[in-house]
Image: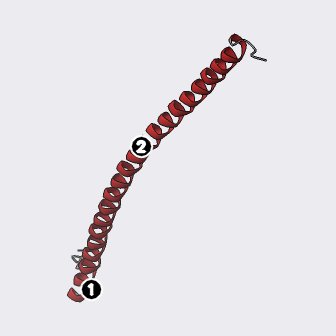
Amino acid sequence: METPLTVEKDIKDILNSIDQKLDGLNNIQVSVATLTTKIDQLQEDIREIKGLQYTQIWRLIWILVWTLVGIISTILLGAIAVFVLIALPNKS
C-alpha cells in the first residue's frame, strides 16, 4: 500500500511569493499610469504641432500673395513708364 503524498511549505514562503506577485502587479499599474500620462502629453504635442503647421501654411500663402502683388505692380509700373516715355513727344 502506498503512503499518501503530503506537501509541506512554509507559510512565510507562500506569503513572500504572493507579496512578490502583488509587487509585480503594482509595478504594472504604475507603468500603465506612466504610459497613459505620456500618451496624453503626446496628444497635446500633436495638437500643438498641427496648429503651428496651420499657421505656417497661411503665412506661406500670404508671402506668396504679396510676392505676386509686388511682381505684378512692378511689371505694371514698368509698362506705364515705358508707355509714358514712348507716347510723350520729345520736347527738345
The image shows residue 33 at horizontal and vertical percentages of: 28, 65
Q: Residue at x 71, y 17 (%)?
A: 85
Q: Please, is residue 4 above or below residue 54 in the view?
A: below
Under circle 1, the secondary element is helix
Tell me which amino acid carries mark 2: Thr
**Label located before the other in sequence (2 or 1):** 1
Task: Give the residue at mark 1.
Answer: 13
Residue 54 shows in the view:
yes
Please tell me which residue lies in front, 61 or 8. Answer: 61
**What's the mark number on residue 82?**
none
Neighbour tally class for label 1: few under 14, some 14-19, many 20 plus, Cα within 10 Å? few
| Direction front: furthest residue | 92
Q: Residue at x 57, y 26 (%)?
A: 73
Judge left or right: residue 43 versus residue 87.
Answer: left
| Direction right: furthest residue | 92
Q: CA distance from mark 2 to mark 1?
A: 63 Å
Please tell me which residue lies in front, 18 or 50. Answer: 50
The image shows residue 11 at horizontal and vertical percentages of: 20, 86
The image shows residue 35 at horizontal and vertical percentages of: 34, 62
Please tell me which residue lies in front, 40 or 23. Answer: 40
Residue 8 shows in the view:
no
Q: Residue at x 41, y 49 (%)?
A: 49
**What's the mark number on residue 55?**
2
Under circle 2, the secondary element is helix
Neighbour tally class for label 2: few under 14, some 14-19, many 20 plus, Cα within 10 Å? few
Q: Please, is residue 36 above or below residue 72 in the view?
A: below
Tell me which amino acid carries mark 1: Asp
The image shows residue 24 at horizontal and vertical percentages of: 30, 73
Judge left or right: residue 77 versus residue 24.
Answer: right
Quadrant of residue 23 in the image? bottom left
